[in-house]
Image (cartoon, rainbow, N blue to C red):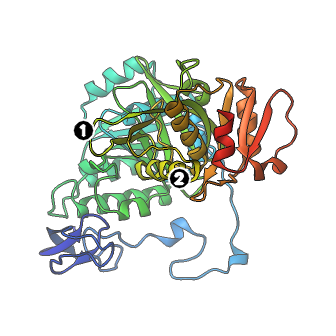
Amino acid sequence: MAKAKNTAVFFCQECGYESVKWMGQCPGCKTWNSFVEEKMSIRSKRNGVPVRAGAVGPVRTGAIGSGRAGEASRLSEVVMDDGERIGTGMEELDRVLGGGIVPGSLTLVGGDPGIGKSTLLLQVCQKLVNKGQKVLYISGEESLKQIKIRAERIGEFGDDLLLLCETNLDIIEEAILHICPCMVVIDSIQTMYSEEISAAPGSVSQVREATGVFLQLAKGMNVSIFIVGHVTKEGTVAGPRVLEHMVDAVLYFEGDRHASYRILRGVKNRFGSTNEIGVFEMREEGLTEVKNPSEFMLEGRPEGASGSIVACSMEGTRPILIEIQALVCGSNFGIPRRQATGTDFNRVNLLMAVLEKRAGLQLSGCDAYVNLAGGIKIMEPAIDLGIVMAVVSSFKNRAVDDKMIVFGEVGLSGEVRAVSMAEQRVLEAKKLGFHSCVVPAVCLKGIKNQEGIKIIGVKSVRDAIDLI
């Protein structure tokens, strides 16, 4: 083992910036009071190169690229190897990953406690094992019996699923090299530690060191590794921000753990789109795919109720219909109360100001509550027109046609601006049985004639309000 000596280094908890002294503001991410002191050990060499413990060591270039270490290659000489993706057997997960698991990839899965991260990955292990693939599941939080209990609830597993309860990074590295599995699951990255670093497990240096080791194993052995990451109260993965930069893909598991739905969102993907989502439903036997999220989100929608409108949002290449609910009533307080669930609160205030200025609606003395039913979070501007019409419908207490959907971005002048992929949104509405669709007038030329659905173009919020 390499010789080591102790020292102290200060790290930024947000971005991982390193300094030899404490600083009030991080030069990297400009965050205040984010530096923490950690005891470090300086290892003499790794692969013959002096490195500091906690830093990502030099990766063997020959194991990842096609040239020798330190030798540059011409772009025209690089040989493309598409590589076959490994299907997980779960279409929703394959969609988020961009078509399946890429061999040699390192994927980070984050989410709130109890949301279903371990259950999802254990189901993926089940699908791959049943296909004859060898999978290694490494847990630093649960015992073998606890994993067995959850596995029995999911279903039957083959003999190629290997379990290892260990947190020592050196032992885990030896096990992966010895077993040579097709896929490895690390649950979780915050429990892994290296004896060569004196910092506690879950610290910035330990998390960065563990991720660096798994990155080298994934690229050098061409094995797919999934690592589970805890999240902070702000919803981001705990540990250094550099963790998300090192991995190939970052998936966030969203949703209320007390509700049945779960949404898997890809926020980073080097092998596919970063806007795709997968929808799952938590049941007793595990997570079940929701093949038609629009139909799932509109279940239980009231008929003939004011303040209810259906809008369409694009998540990657998938159109999703979502019910927008609004409740506007007179305020009993000096300052009216405003609340938004599932969308940007400031955006709702802006749209209500547009209605006051451009449509003459006196909303300044009213409480307003806006909710996106189903618990999904949407920040796309295309739902602006849906929010506007829901607020107006509740304010005037007039119901909108149950078979009508709307979408469009609203500007500060009250104009309705164009949105992307308008034709795909109309086709999704037609598929679910809607009879009319309110769209921005500038999008009409990009929509082919659709039989069975009436398309109405509007130029301003006044035109949309006239429909109510």
Judged from the image, the secondary structure of the residue bearing numbered disc 1 is loop
Q: Amino acid at mark 1?
A: Glu
Q: Badge 2: few (under 14), some or many (20 or more) residues near its Cα, within 10 Å? A: many
Disc 1: which residue: 141
Looking at the picture, how far across and down is residue 100, in whole percent? 60, 43
34 to the left or right of 440: left
Q: In the rendered image, is residue 86 in sight?
A: no
What x and y, as percent, mark residue 449?
88, 38
Task: Looking at the picture, tell me which residue is in the foreground, 48 or 23.
Answer: 23
| Element at label 2 | helix
Examine the image and state in which quarter residue 81 appears. Answer: bottom right
Q: Nearest the camera: 4 or 234?
A: 234
Q: Nearer the viewer, residue 114 or 191?
A: 114
Mark identifier at residue 8: none
Side (left or right) of 8 relative to 153 = left
Circle 1 crowding by C-alpha within 10 Å: few under 14, some 14–19, many from 20: some
- What x and y, as percent, mark residue 248? 50, 57
Can see residue 319? yes
Quick one: 337 or 226, which is closer to the camera?
Answer: 337
Label 2 sits on what residue type?
Answer: Val
Displayed quadrant of residue 17: bottom left
Q: Residue at x 33, y 72 (%)?
A: 29
Up-down: is 281 above or below 118?
above
Image height check: is 36 above or below 329? below
Q: Quadrant of the N terminus?
A: bottom left
Q: Which mark is residue 354?
A: 2
